[in-house]
Amino acid sequence: MEFDYSKPHEECGVFGVYSMDGALNPAYATYNGLLALQHRGQESCGIAVNDQGVISCYKDMGLVTETFNDKILRELKGQIAVGHVRYSTAGASVRENSQPLVMRYIKGTLAIAHNGNLSNAYELRHELEHRGCIFQTTIDSEVIAYLIARERVKAPSIEEAVYRAMPKVQGSYSMIVMSPQKLIAVRDPNGFRPLCIGRVENSYVFASETCALDACGAEFVRDVEPGEIVVADKDGLRSMTLPNKAAKSLCVFEYIYFARTDSVVDGISVYEARKEAGRLLARQHPVEADMVIGVPESGIDAAIGYSEESGIPYQKGIVKNGYIGRTFIKPDQASRERSVRIKLNALGTAVKGKRVVMLDDSIVRGTTCARIVSMLKDAGAKEVHLRISSPPFLWPCYYGTDIPSKDELIACKHTIEEIGKMSFADSIEFLALENLPKMLGVESDCGHYCDACFSGRYPAAVPSHSMASKENKYCVPIRRD
């Protein structure tokens, strides 16, 4: 199997349930939550459940529907659960690296599901190894597990252990920790990755996105704040704040591409943000055309916004095969060249003879975009004008997004005009960097989100060594086209 690297990828999604009152079946609720979060990771998935202090776990490579069935879920009995869907940015794509991680130590058992990347994971792991720690995986999440377990030996509670361990960690983490008695959600001081809280009667749910709360029938309560530790136990919910303060820096690409369109992230509707990006593009870069189309799925919302602002009719011009995920078999070069048609195909009767404005969320290497434009022109489109609802990628990400090195980013090597020619488009324009705050409806970018992949302004430490590096001794190379 080979992965579709035409877009940046999120590392994972996390989900957790605390249900001592029986309002939710933790295993089934987690299964439904992970289905809703499947877009955040399609390599592996897992669920760990806690039955009166005894933690068991089932996980494997593949999609949620491929990994779990009713028989497995019935056997996952308990009152607390934590789940995870994974796409690897740090560590190889193998079963050993799937989550949740379950660790048995002197104080009992922990299960951890982590979304993000630690920028100092290499240094922390090096230190722990020299103290005798033996690692079973190549992921930075295991580093966090060791730090929490080590602090728990001296701390009076698991939440105090988390509180003491997290200041040692740099980078991004939205994480759920399950102990024999408690479920804990923690978000890094910058809030790079989303995390929210839901409720069903006296049961509590933690999830990467609000769409997962909807999937299990939970009512949205609030977001976990950056730098906050939220504990669910027999006494209800309580909160602690991490000591290291930082400016809020949610990844702006959550709104552009990662999050599901029906989610609300940190109080901002993903759908409305994407539509606003389209409106901004229409005002910023108008063009005479007959129709506006969007590249499924995240380009569609921006296309609707562009159409509303410009008055050019929105129509369906590209059909997506809904049964194709981020992995598909490509046995030879000819198949790789045709791979875009496996997932997407032009609606010839709609685009033939038309001047088309095509909205897409981003361009990484540029090859896929060129294939889509060629596909539309082969179907008879008279003109194709590309409008991209994000600025050009110019910098790598160190906080949990698999954006390649600058050597692989087309915008680092070519001008916008050159990218347009390479894409076979009649014109091409990107959303201006200064329009990102307007897209989110905030006054400025300061203290609201991270746009480092576009601007190079990193709000937190970047690694001197990276466990995500394919040359790193801890990682197995992943083949890429």
Image: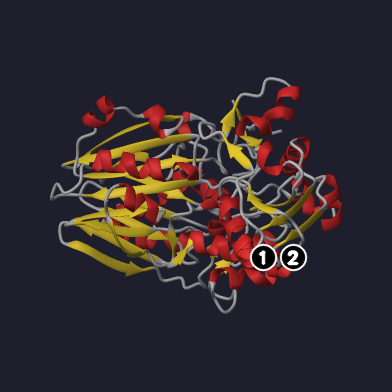
- Residue in the foreground of this view, choosing between 293 and 350: 350
* Outermost residue toward the top in this view: 331
Instruction: Name the residue: 74% across, 29% down.
Output: 337
Q: Is residue 130 above or below residue 157?
A: above
- Disc 1, disc 2: CB below 8 Å? yes
* Outermost residue toward the left in this view: 21
> Are there few (<14), some (14-19), or many (20+) residues within 10 Å of tag 1?
some
Circle 1 residue: 310
Q: Would you say residue 457 is visible in this rendering?
A: no
Circle 2 residue: 286
Measuring from the top left, give residue 212's x and y in whole percent: 36, 50
Q: Amino acid at mark 1?
A: Ser
Instruction: Name the residue: 64% across, 32% down.
Output: 477
Q: Where, by quadrant of the figure, is residue 422 drawn?
A: top right
> Are there few (<14), some (14-19), or many (20+) residues within 10 Å of tag 2?
some
Q: CA distance from mark 1 to mark 2?
A: 7 Å
- Residue in the foreground of this view, choosing between 49 and 144: 49
Q: Is residue 258 above or below residue 242?
A: above
Instruction: Name the residue: 58% across, 51% down.
Output: 300
Q: Secondary structure at mark 1?
A: helix
Q: Is residue 54 left or right of residue 224?
A: left
Instruction: Name the residue: 41% across, 27% down.
Output: 66
